[in-house]
Image (tube, grey):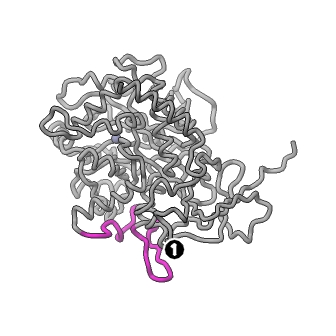
Amino acid sequence: MSETPAQLIAWIPELIYQANGFADGMALVCDGSDSIVRLVHVDQLTDERRINLRRRAILPGMINAHSHAFQRVIRGRTEYRTANQRDSFWTWRELMYSAATRLTPEDVYDASRMAFLEMALNGITAVGEFHYLHHAPDGTPYDDPNLLAKEVVRAARDVGLRIALLRVAYARSGFNTDPNPRQARFIESDAELYLKSVQALAASVGNPTVREGAGDDAGDEKSAGTLAHARVSDTSWVGIAPHSVRAVPLDYLKSVAAYANEHDLKVHMHVAEQPAEVSACVEEYGRTPVALLQSEGLLSERFTAVHAIHVTPKAIASFAGTRAMVCACPTTERNLGDGVVPADEYLKHGVSICLGTDSHAQIDLFEDARELEYHLRLQKLERVVVSGGASGGGDDSGTFPDGRVSALATRLFDCATVNGARSIGAAAGTLAPGTPADFFTIDLDDPAVAGAAAHDLLPAIVFSSSRAAIREVVVGGKPIVSEGQHLMQEDVIERFNELQKRLWA
Ligand SMILES: [Zn+2]
C-alpha cells in the first residue's frame, strides 16, 4: 500500500453551529483518525470527499454527564402509589432496588444498550455512567470485580457512544443506619478494595496512567497521557464516584479523593439531592455535605456535584471558589420530587452546570436543558431567568446583527455540551479543530423548528425540538444514526423487550 494519507471527508450541511450562532456555506472537514481538521468555507474545499447534508444543521454532540443506565428497566413502573402515606424519592428507591437486585450481567448489558441507543437517537455522543452495580445479587463478588462495569462499557461501545465509567464507591447504608440487603450488590466496604478494582478497570478500558499496581488485569499498553481529559481517540475511560456522604464515610472518602488527585481523575458524587441526606450529614459531622467536602479539601475543578439542590449561599461560593461543577438532572429531579436546582444562583457565581438524564424517566437532554430554566420560571414567576451575568462555561455573549441575543439558549446548550465534556473529561463538546468528529444534525424542515432563521435556530432547537428533528449522529467520524434510525436499533429493542418481559412477567 502507498503512504497516501486517508482522504479527508467534508460534511456540508446548510448550517454549522459555532460558539454563538450558526454559519452557512461552511464545511466540517474530518480526517481518517476521526478528528475535526478544520471548518472552512465550501469554496475552499479541494479534493475532500464531500457528504452533502441538504436542509440540515450540524451541532456538536451532546454530553450526558449523569446516567444510571440499568434504571431504564423501571421506566413507567414506578408511577403509582405504594402502601406509603406519602411517596417520595425514598419509596421510589425501594422500587428501583427491586429491579437492581434481579439483573444478570447479560441483562445489565441489554438494559444499558437500550438506554445508550436512546441517547444516541437524541444526539448524545458521550455519557458519564455513574455505575454502582458491582456484585452478584446476594452480594457475592464476581470473579472479576468489574464484570458488570465492563458489560456497561461494552454496551456503550456497541452502540457507538463514548463513555466515562464513573465507578461508584459505596460502603454503607447510611450514618447509624442498618444495612439494607437490597444494597448488597453495591457495597465495597473498604477503600483499598475499591481502588484495586478501579485500577484494574482503568487498565482494561483506558486511563493509561492508572496502571501501576494494577496487577494481572492490566490491559493493553497505552502511552501515558493526562486523565483529566480523555484523548481525542478514547472511547472509554474511568472516573471516581463516591456515591454520597451518606454511603461513604469520611475516611473512605478521603482515601478515594487522594487517589483521584494523584491520578488526575474526575470525581462525581451525589450531593444534597434530598433534605434528609443533608440533615443526616449535619447529624454525623455537624456540617452540611458541601461544607464537609469544602473543609476536607475534597472540592476541586475535577469535582462534579450531582443534583446539589438543597444548598446554602455559602455552598454555592464553595463551588465557585474551587471551580467544582454541578450536574443538574431536571427531568429526574421533577420525577422524584427532589426540588429545583438553583441554576440562576450557580451561574451568577460562575459555577458551571452540566446535565444528566440520571434515572432515564425520559432521555432527552434538550428537555433537561429547558427544564433548568423552566423550573425557575415557575418558581419565580419570571421569564428568561438563567440568562445574563457571569458565565459558568462557554461564551454566551453572542449578539446578532439585528440586536437579538440568544444568550439563554447558548447558555443552556453549553450545559449540554462544553460543560458536560469538562465534567466527564471528554475531549468533545465543540466543533473545534483537533476535537473528535462527534456531532448530530437537525432537520431544518422538521415541524418543530421549521421557519427558524439562523439566529433563531438554537432557541427553537433548545426550547421546541424533539428527537424527531435529529436525523444523523456521528461519533469519531462514523455515522451511528442515519435518517433518525440507529444501525442496531431493531436488535437492541428486541433484546430489551425480551428482558422486560422476563423481569416484569
Ligand atoms: Zn444519580
Q: Does residue 235 sit above or below 251 in this rendering?
A: below
Image coordinates of residue 399 in percent, x first then y, are: 46, 77
Q: Please, what is the three-letter code of the amino acid marked with disc 1?
A: Ala
Please report the residue visible at 56 percent of the width from the left and 54 percent of the height from the top: 471
Q: In this rendering, does residue 259 appear at all? A: no
Q: Can you tell which quarter of the image residue 24 is in?
A: bottom right
Q: Residue furthest right?
A: 2
Residue 384 lies in the magenta stretch: yes
Please report the residue visible at 46 percent of the width from the left and 63 percent of the height from the top: 448
Q: Is residue 98 left or right of residue 471?
A: left
Q: Is residue 223 left or right of residue 362?
A: right
Image coordinates of residue 273 in percent, x first then y, are: 26, 45
Q: Secondary structure at mark 1?
A: loop
The range drawn in magenta is 382-408
Quadrant of the drawing holding the C terminus = top left
Residue 10 lies in the magenta stretch: no
